[in-house]
Amino acid sequence: MLHSQRVAVLVDISDPTLQQQATAELGNSGCATAPLAADLDDARVAVVDGASRATALAESHKSLKVLALVEAGDLALIGKHVTTFAIKPWAEGELALRVQSLLEDLESPEQVQIRLLATAVHAASDVVEITDPQARLQYVNPAYEATLGFAPDEVIGKTPKELVRSDYHPPEYFREIDRTLSAGDVWRGLLVSKSKDGGLVYFEAAIAPIKDAQGRMTHHLAVKRDVSEQLKRERALEETNRALEQAKDAAVAASRSKSEFLANMSHELRTPLNAIIGYAELLLEDAMDAGNDPLTADLKKIRAAGAHLLDLINDVLDISKIEAGRMELYVEAFDLDTLLRDVVATIEPNLTGRGNRLVTELPPASLVVRADERKVRQILMNLLSNASKFTERGTVTLRARRERDDGGDWLSFEVEDTGIGIAEATLSRLFRPFVQADASTTRRYGGTGLGLALSRRFAELMGGGISVTSVVGKGSTFSVRLPMSVTLRPGSARPSYTPGSGKSVLVIDDDETIHDQLTRTLVKRGFRVAFAARGEEGLSAARELKPDVIVLDVMMPGMDGWSVLTALKVDAATADIPVIMMTMTDQRDVGAALGAVDYFVKPVEPARLVATIRRHLRQPVDPGAPILVVEDDSAIREVMRRSLVGAGYRVVEATNGMEALGLVARQIPAFIVLDLMMPEMDGFQFLDALRDQPDCSEVPVMIVTAKMLSAKERQRLERSAQGVISKNAHSRADLLNLIGEHISLMLERKDKRGD
């Protein structure tokens, strides 16, 4: 009766009396009935009067079980899709029994779901396993055999450990799986199994516990997807990417090496070449004074050839500087009209010599431009020289104008010629170094192919660009666009001081915001400020500018602050410059800004050691306080002791940090010279212990080491560096003010010492 209560029986009988009789009989047996006009999608059984009508319904709705009510003579008319029949008039209760039999043959929705699920599991490409709580396999689908090679009759009743477990995972890995399942959770992860042929199969697996109605674990269900090929592809891709990255690094290194070689060689070539040109000039004057015309002509050729060669070397030097990242901009304000008239006067003889006419369309009023004047001039000279070279008895036009748009204020140039033009296929590679239109052009017109490449690079360095349009046989137009006011990126120009006459500060930091804010802070206090954006640039600036104080960021790309500090202290030209170390955790909060007393790399020169200590030694609490030398090497310790005693200082010695702490406990020293690498207690541990003692927090400590420090070691030193700027500065402004005060204090102390 279960199905009859859930499924309506459709009744389609045209005779009202029979319709009423059938409906009443089915209703008394517990069946719900409905007319055939109802929705057939959910119907399962239908009672239809007439062989033809029953056959038609059965054929159109094959999922229906159709019972036909027919006359005895119409049995032959019943179609094959009709399920059963009853002869009219049917016996009492017969119709209900036949319908009940049909309903009992039907699957319940749950049975349908189970059948569909079993079909899906059987057909799945993923491996599906069902095991009992002891991990004995109860079921595997066909994908198990297809993937691992074991047939179902080989695995049922056995455990994966007996069949497919590999040595890829440690025992603890499987214990973790067991713990997860015992807790009632689903485990997901990678499982590497061993197939029947001994190969490894990588599975992306999920294993879930199955519980009965009482919550008892009865089985485990595992679904595993073979990802072996995917992992192979990913590993192959990683290897390919790694190889490409290595090839790229090698290519970049090779290119940089080439550029550095060219730059160095160009310098080496220019030195003797300048001498050749200079002596040619002297000999030319002598020959002209002596009236020696044949020699004069020869010397003019030598001078012209030397000057041409020097131009070529200068081009090679410039392109190599750009590629090596060493090209600098010298931005200054200049009058555009003066520059253009000078360029026109220089190029005009070359143009007229080839029968060309120069047309200029220049701004009506003079404009002041902020850019690298030499590079703007070189761009225009290169473009006009090319126009003259490839045009004969034609017209070359130079246009200049100012343009304003949403992107800013721009200066535009155009150099247009009526020369031979450039093929479209050549335009895409025209601005590459050493490239010309084609070999025939090179043979006929000469040149190195560097002029256009340099011009584009110069324009890009200044924040602009160059483009070209051309038609073969009609001529070319080169367009240059530059900002009216070029903005320097950090590191693009040689550092120089802000105007003023006060003490000088060199800031080495890659953060443009720090540049701006430190300028405002320090200039207000009367300092002159210069900036360098990279460690290497900062070292050069320190040697050239000789600042009174250096503010040095710890965290910088490339050469970090500690590496710069080391280089500064081992260079005699910069060793005496006070250095303030600075670092910030992010763009808003201050982490720490650190002061450095001094840093030496062995071997230590005695004279420098004494001079350094004299420079930093302040009046101690105890006038008789000694200098403490902490060094485990007896020879080095002896050199230091004799040097300091000879200079009039009292010295106490310790061979390691523990011994030194004992001496400090008896008397606080005026100054400590500390080796980092020692037995028992090294210099790092000693510094940590020393700074924990309040009375010793102001004792100057000079580090002496024979090694370059690692990042971790530098971080340890940061925590114990002399002159720490407090973390109580909770804002960038507070930090900058503290730095300004710290610089003033250092310079006051320096002036008092008479350094």
Image (tube, rainbow, N blue to C red):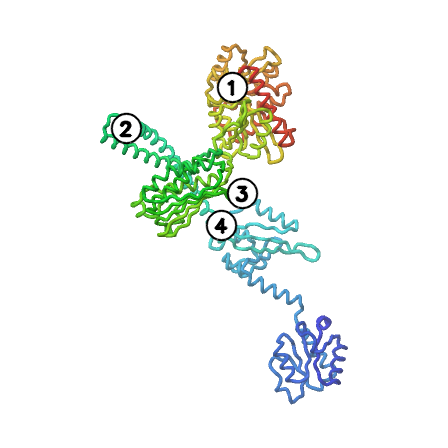
**Tag of residue 284:** 2
Q: Earlier in the sequence, mark 1 or mark 2?
A: 2
Q: Which one is closest to the eye, mark 2 or mark 3?
A: 2
Given residues 368 and 617, the one toward you in this image is 368
Residue at the spot of label 4 = 234
- Whether residue 308 sits left or right of residue 460 in the image: it is left
Q: Earlier in the sequence, mark 4 or mark 1?
A: 4
Using the numbered discs, state the Cα–Cα distance from disc 3 to disc 1 in whole angstroms. Answer: 62 Å
State the quadrant of the N terminus.
bottom right
Residue 209 percent location from the top left of the image: 63, 54
SS under mark 3: strand
- At label 3, which amino acid type do we have? Gly
Residue 272: name its quadrant.
top left
- At label 1, which amino acid type do we have? Glu
Task: Give me the residue at 56% from left, 63% from top.
Answer: 122
Q: Is residue 70 visible?
A: yes
